[in-house]
Image (spheres, rainbow, N blue to C red):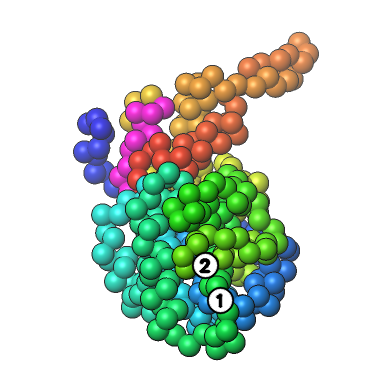
Amino acid sequence: MKFYQTLRNAAKFRTVFDFGGRDVAHWFPGHMAKGLRQMRASLRNVDCVIEIHDARIPFSGRNPVFQDTLDVKPHVLILNKMDLADLSHKQRILKKLENNGMRNVLFTDCLKQRDDNMKKLVPMVMEMIESTPRFNRDEATYYCLMVIGVPNVGKSSLINSLRRTNLKKGRASKVGGEPGITKAVLTKIQVCERPLMYLLDTPGVLPPKIESVETGMKLALCGTILDHLVGEDVIADYLLYSLNRLENFSYVEKYDLQEPSDDIQHVLKRIAVKLKKTQRVKAITGVGNITVIVPNYTAAAYDFIRAFRKGELGRVMLD
């Protein structure tokens, strides 16, 4: 990194983000309530619940509605996309989760062809199941897991990774780059032969009431809420605010800025210029309408957000 990493002039940057009185109530699509009902109905046939969440937000957005479900079944928390997360404070994260009653935690990168951490999951699950009464599952000759989580954190990628690791087989569940790919509880998918183990894929479910607008923005930035519900311009501005707050100025070099900036319009203009993202618009003048070429701020915002989600702006911890 260049000289700008040494900048410590906190007065240059915002210390709080102006959410503009936004209401996050409409960020909860209707199909999620149906999905939650289906998950609860399937629970009696499940031996263990696998909750998967984004490692960049290990606390924000974990659905409290799941607690009713998790209390009665063995429970593993998988923090996926660890390749995108700054894990320098990993022990602090684990300690806080343990204080909240979450002791079985695994960090993963499910898109990686060989993720050694995935090899630990089946033994961890078996140890938990064997130390807990199975109740109505005692006679079952196979084990059934249910994977749950907010949208777009890698549930389908987890299933596919388990199949690669334990069965040497390929995809069994569709993977998408936006939330809402899985909209109904699917049939059982085999993920292991010995022991015989199946997994239920489920739709991503957000809390019906997101605890704060900031939590909602972190979820949006990580792609768990459809961008258009929040607005790409707002997400891009929150990303800039977050990077500056973390003193991560990688965007300066990537987009050829002179120095870090707290002005999202300035940053998006520079991105648009670098990427040649322009659009033609009509302008009214004294001699009639003329067409002018201006920077495409929406396209620039999309590229900025996409770069963050792909890890091109460095590893980040938002919580």
Residue 89 numbered tag: none
**Residue 260 appears in which quarter of the rendering?**
top left
Look at label 2 and name its amino acid: Leu
The span from disc 1 to disc 2 (Cα, nearest Å) is 8 Å
The residue positioned farthest toward the top in the image shown? 287
Q: Position of residue 181 (x, y in %)?
A: 65, 51
Q: Position of residue 133 (x, y in %)?
A: 48, 88
Is residue 172 or residue 282 the one in the foreground? 172
Residue 45 falls left or right of residue 71? right
Q: Dot 2 lies on which element?
A: loop
Is residue 16 or residue 107 the one in the foreground? 107
The residue range painted magenta reads 244-255
User: Which part of the image, by quadrant, shows the C terminus?
Assistant: bottom left
Q: Dot 1 lies on which element?
A: loop
Q: Position of residue 162 (x, y in %)?
A: 48, 56
Q: Position of residue 155 (x, y in %)?
A: 54, 57
The residue that mark 2 highlights is: 196
Is residue 84 or residue 29 the one in the foreground? 84
Instruction: Work out whether mark 1 precedes mark 2 in sequence or the reverse, and give the earlier one.
Output: 1
Q: Is residue 5 magenta?
A: no
Seen at 29% across and 71% down, the residue is 95
Is residue 111 or residue 269 the one in the foreground? 111
User: Which part of the image, by quadrant, shows the N terminus?
Assistant: top left
- Relative vertical location of residue 86 with respect to residue 70 in this rendering, above or below: above
Labels 1 and 2 touching (C-beta < 8 A): yes
Mark 2: few/some/many CA within 10 Å (<14, 14-19, 20+): few
Seen at 26% across and 54% down, the residue is 88
Look at label 1 and name its amino acid: Thr
Residue 217 appears in view: no
Seen at 40% across and 64% down, the residue is 121
Residue 141 numbered tag: 1
